[in-house]
Amino acid sequence: MRVKLQLVMCNDKGDEETVTDVVTLNKNTQRIEHLGLILAESKQLLSTLQRHLLQQQITTFLDTRSTCRDCGTPLKLKARASRSFRTVFGTFQFDSPRLEHCDCTRRKTSSFRPLAALLTASVAPEILYMEAKWSSLVSYGMSLDALQDFLPLDLSLDVKTVRYDTLKVAKRLEAELGDEQSGCIEGTPSDWDLLPSPEGFFTVGIDGGYVRNWVDKKHNFEVIVGKSILSFEEGEEDRAPSLKRFGFVQTQDTKPKRRLYEVLHSQGLQMNQEITFLSDGDDKLRELQVEMSPQATHKYLSKSNLIF
């Protein structure tokens, strides 16, 4: 059986403009492994679709920037170059022309690259998210292996790049974290009475442990980790619990309470919502929990009862 897949590009009015043969597959039907798309074929399909779609989008964008926005005069080409763009479905090269500004209006520069306004980075946000997500769970090397197993990534992608991308995402998230505060309770009791009835209840477990310093083996540093679970009543079986984890190094993190606050509020915590904190009663853990919610209940357990 021969299968031909085509990509049809339509304009904003819905009219078909281009039809491109994306891939042609010769499929057998004699054995179970012949059924459907295999992983290699799906990678080829995704990569090819991505290339055609990106090229069309960039061409359309450049067409809208090829004339002067003030007078409509076509802009002159000054030079040609190329830009690379790394995505979850491969890395692609595109022409990036440099155009001369029109003389009708005074500009700070004599020329510009219109593609710079669209490709503000050389890596798509989605691949940064995937790299950071997997790297938070397993090693950089295993993250790379897992992503390359099911995505048509650039074969030249290496562990150093994944580590660099992950650290770049982490630094951006750290910069977006709000200021540290001693208390996170918002409003007054009269304000809490006006809040809608909360959905579900929170259980937050927090514990600490010591990890050996990788550089100086004789010294340890303390890592505090926690898990926040938003659960629902028995009559709401169709609603899956919301679960989030957080962690930080005690001697390095300057905003531990703010970090916990952001985790809870990302799950929708309200000031009139039931929340139970579980810990072993360590002073640092107790301080982390206080003034987090007026409805908080604190339970102190032995370390053997704290399971993450």
Image (cartoon, grey):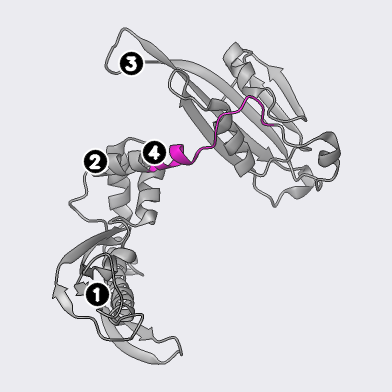
Label 4 sits on residue: 171
Residue 159, which numbered label? Answer: 2
Secondary structure type for disc 1: loop
Kindly indicate whether the residue at mark 4 contacts the one at mark 1 (C-beta within 8 angstroms). no
Kindly identify the amino acid type of the residue bearing the numbered disc 3.
Asn
In percent of width and height, residue 82 lies at 17, 66
Using a 10 Å C-alpha cutoff, classify the residue at mark 3 as few (fewer than 14 neighbours), some (14 to 19) or many (20 or more).
few
The residue carrying mark 3 is: 213
Q: Is residue 228 left or right of residue 186?
A: left
Residue span colored magenta: 169-184
Q: Counting other residues with Cα less than 10 Å from the Cα at mark 4, is it few (<14), some (14-19), or many (20 or more)? A: few
The label nearer to you, 4 versus 3, is: 4
* Kind of residue sitting beneath label 1: His
Under tag 4, what secondary structure?
Answer: helix
Quarter the N terminus occupies? bottom left
Please give the name of the residue rendered at 32% of the width and 55% of the height, measured from the top-left corner: 150
Q: Position of residue 26 (x, y in %)?
A: 24, 77
Numbered mark located on residue 57 in the image: none
Q: Earlier in the sequence, mark 1 or mark 2?
A: 1
> Which mark is in front, 3 or 1?
1
Q: Label 4 amino acid?
A: Lys
- Front disc: 1 or 2: 1
Quarter location, residue 305:
top right
Task: Verify whether residue 181 appears in magenta.
Answer: yes
